[in-house]
Image (cartoon, coloured by chain):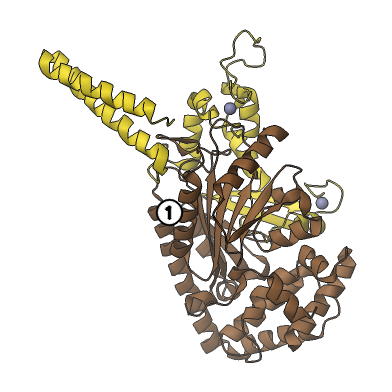
Amino acid sequence: MVCQECKKKQATVHFTKIINGEKIELKLCESCAEQRGDLDFDGQQPFSVHQLLAGLLDLEEMPNVKGQTTTSNAGICKNCGLTEMQFAKIGRLGCTQCYQTFGARLNPLLKRVQGRSSHNGKVPKRSGGDIKLKREIEKLRESLNRYVIEEKFEDAAVLRDKIKALESELTQGGGA
Amino acid sequence: MSLKGFIDKNLSRWIQEQEGKTSEVVLSSRIRLARNLNDIPFPFLADSTDQSKVVELVRDAMEGQKDFSYLSRKNLSLEDRQALMEKHLISMQLVNDNKDSGLWLNKDESASIMVNEEDHIRIQVLLPGFELEEARKKADELDDALEQKLNYGFNEEKGYLTSCPTNVGTGLRASVMVHLPGLVLTKQINKVLTAVSQLGLAVRGIYGEGSEAAGNILQISNQITLGQREEEIIDNIKRVTKQIIDHEHNARKWLLNEKKIEIKDKVHRAYGVLSNAYTISSKEALELLSQVKLGIDLQLLDKESSQIFKELIVLIRPGYLQKLYGQKLSEKQRDIKRAEVIRERLRN
Ligand SMILES: [Zn+2]
Ligand SMILES: [Zn+2]
């Protein structure tokens, strides 16, 4: 067995990581294993994690990206230039915008690796203020729609003004 | 400089000894938060202009953090970077990459911020013993301070946006480094590890087939970062680790009651080899050091404090050895120097 890293020396060290019951194995020579710093306190993801992720993004399911001409840029992130094909290959995003660009492709993947797909944790303080406002606006919109259906137009008008005020607060806040 | 002086000057806070029963098993606790700046490509795609921009933005945001200083990757020698990695302060990626990357590090080396690693920003707090909550509090404060000046990539649905989808959401990786010689010697380790990995936690062994770890050291960390709240993630690891500590203590008790002579023999032989060897591989050294630590913890060996174990697992690694001796060393030379360091450290 030849070392998977340098592909030269004899592999003598077997490196294993278990993720959610799945075993990832690496066979390395002594010096590559040492080089990789496998004593590292989770300093980095082993490279196989990205390969594993890429494997989960089934290339066969991909719309025919390869044959596509540049007339359609649906599969490219406008901000960083990462293509859907690259994303599927390396299993990584290129920038924060990619999360929007590749959302449809990403969500099933997130469900598979993360179990759940909706954030429930910390919200940054500054942009978090925006999120609070946005949530309130959404709520008000729902009520507004209800009033419209119920033909309570006066109440609806009050809400509409309120939403407008909040929306201008949102843009003035400069966030997001 | 004497070895003692070198150690005092070079080792980080997490290597210090922690009082208390859990610290016999939990060597250190770590919290890492992955953060990225909006719209700037992640480091692996960023060009050098973007990379420098991130370095500058973080520099501005770090203004006022007097306890921290910045180490730019390009000003560090390979040996320095390797030594930082062996202290678990930077990743392998930061050792090898050729980016405008670097590290903000506080004085006792308990808190650090990697810039332009896999993500733009990785905040890390690393403490001795079983101190996940304390570590999280510190990391959180740093995160808040940075966020006041930086536009993080964040979205309501996905949380903190990261380069790798395995970190998105909280961006939080919590881990504990545990020393489990009792479970290994009583051959229960595989059962325990299987159980742990089924609870959504990752276990990393070092060297060795399957779950066998060099020096009987393992790391347990959360695998899931999205959907769970930070408190839940930490609580989960804490609960599981507490159970592992109990199992480890029981295994040690059993060994003391049923196999005292065998264990005593093992421990003293290990000590004998370590204090007399003239060449030793890191793998063998780690194994023997683990047994010596077990002996100290079980009070079968009263010559030493278990502090030496934490010091030596760092000191005997290639980067550190080369830093200590101030020169490049071949594998063979390292084995010789390693034995020398251990002999000297055990004698003092
Ligand atoms: Zn190799
Ligand atoms: Zn992008």
Q: Chain of mark 1?
A: B
Q: Position of residue B306 (x, y in %)?
A: 61, 81
Q: Position of residue B127 (x, y in %)?
A: 54, 66
Asked whether mark 1 lies closer than 8 Å to ligand 2, one says no
| Residue A127 picture quarter | top left
Task: Please name the residue shown 59% across and 71% down the image.
Answer: B184
Tag 1: Cα neighbours inside 10 Å, few (<14), some, or many (≥20)?
many
Residue at horizontal 39 percent and vertical 49 percent from the top? B229
**Is B121 rendered above or below residue B259?**
above
Residue A51 shows up from this direction: yes
* Residue B103 higher or lower than A131, as above or below: below
Image quarter (top left, top right, bottom left or bottom right) of the C terminus of chain A: top left
State the residue in front, B77 or A172.
Answer: A172
Whether residue B222 is visible here, answered yes or no, is no
Q: Residue at x 68, y 67 (%)?
A: B214
Q: Foreground residue, A58 or A127? A: A127
Q: Which percent across, then down, holds residue B91?
A: 67, 53
| The colour assigned to chain A within the rendered structure | yellow
Give the residue furthest to the front: B64
**Residue A55 located left or right of residue A135:** right
Give the SS element for disc 1: helix
Find residue B13 and report its image quarter: bottom right
Q: Looking at this view, is A33 or B86 the one in front?
A: B86
- Whether residue A4 is situated above or below residue B193 in the rendered picture: above
Q: What color does chain B have in the rendering?
A: brown
Q: Is residue B102 left or right of residue A144?
A: right
How far across and how far down the image is residue B322, in percent? Answer: 82, 66
Q: Which residue is mark 1?
A: B233
Q: Residue at x 68, y 39 (%)?
A: B52
Q: Left or right? Give the position of A148 relative to B49.
A: left
Q: Residue furthest top?
A: A71
Callout 1 amino acid: Ile
